[in-house]
Amino acid sequence: MKTQIKGVYPPITTPFDQHENIDYSALEKNIKKWNETELAGYVVFGSNGEYAFLSEQEKLDIVKVCIDNAAEGKKIIVGSGCESTKDTIELTNKCAKLGAHFALIVNPNFYKGAMNKKVLKAHFTAVADASDIPILLYNVPKNTCINLEPDLVADLAQHPNIVGIKDSSANITQLAQIISMVPADFNVLVGTAGVLYPGLVFGAKGGVMALATCCPDKCIEIYNLYNAGKYEEAKELQMKMIPVNNAVTGTYGIPGLKYVMETLGYLGGPTRRPLLPLTEDDKVKLDEIMKKAELI
């Protein structure tokens, strides 16, 4: 029986100061504020954590701060996928030694043309064989331009140390396919709040969602309403939050997410270049979206 992973997880952002150095004090404050919610844990240096812009030492330092400040019972999932299998294993086990509970492994994607199912299966299997902690697959074709097909996921789900997947494809049909093909104890998590409600209907066990970083209570409410059988209320709240989710995951991206965090009482801070800050016009548009969702 694989470890159960359920509930709502935010892929936490990395706060930087005006010189693009990590603001560890702001990170601690955010974690302590998130600790007051029913979040199941934290995903550290995932896509919304600007992990592609972080050095290995910065990643390890962030993991340590999160582990030291997370409330008891909160699970720490680390986005330790690298381009090479060797580096992925090494970083994953360094995070494990710090106390991380699970690793979220994105597929290599620089040599896209070579990343066929045989190569990807060999990569994930080698990582799972050598990892000191259980791993979750991370499917984010928007960023990698590679989709982990349901049959590959179902095949990898047989590995005892591959315990789940975060599917950020936003393809609800594919999500349903995956759930229908994997064992019941395999943890399928939606990767965007835009499909949280339908994902739960099909059998997802929760989600790792950017929206949970700035609006954790709304994501938790959708999850709890669904589990309480209050389906209409859950669906209504889901629909209300879709424009906000679209804004922070697509239209305005990480700069938009950090701005919404700042507006709603968290410490977002600037992004690290090459990402640029929002324009004043974009801030006005985001304010309108938040007002319509009754967040401000």
Image (tube, helix red, strand yellow):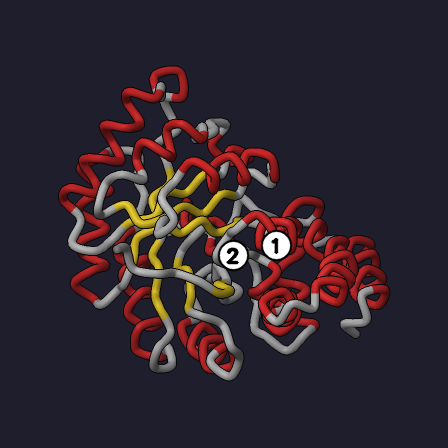
Which quadrant of the figure contains the N terminus?
bottom left
Q: Nearer the viewer, residue 260 or 147?
A: 147
Q: In the figure, 9 relative to 134: above or below? A: below
Q: Which amino acid, mark 2?
A: Gly
Q: Disc count in the image?
A: 2
Q: Nearer the viewer, residue 267 or 21?
A: 267
Q: In the figure, 14 relative to 216: above or below? A: above
For this orientation, the residue located farthest to the top is 113
CA gap, disc 1 and disc 2:
7 Å
148 to the left or right of 209: left
x, y percent for residue 37: 53, 79
> Quick check: marks 1 and 2 in contact, CB under 8 Å?
yes
Where residue 3 is drawn, which disc sits there? none
Q: Secondary structure at mark 1?
A: helix
x, y percent for residue 157: 32, 40
Q: Residues within 10 Å of mark 2 (few under 14, many from 20)?
A: many
Tell me the residue at 51%/84% (across/down): 36
* Sequence-earlier tag: 1 or 2: 1
Tell me the residue at 47%/42% (across/down): 179
150 to the left or right of 105: right
Where residue 196 is drawn, which disc sits there? 1
Tell me the residue at 76%/63% (across/down): 232
Residue underneath mark 2: 207
Q: Residues within 10 Å of mark 1 (few under 14, many from 20)?
A: many
x, y percent for residue 217: 62, 74
x, y percent for residue 261: 63, 68
Residue 4 found in image quarter: bottom left
Which quadrant of the figure contains the C terminus?
bottom right
Q: Which amino acid, mark 1?
A: Leu
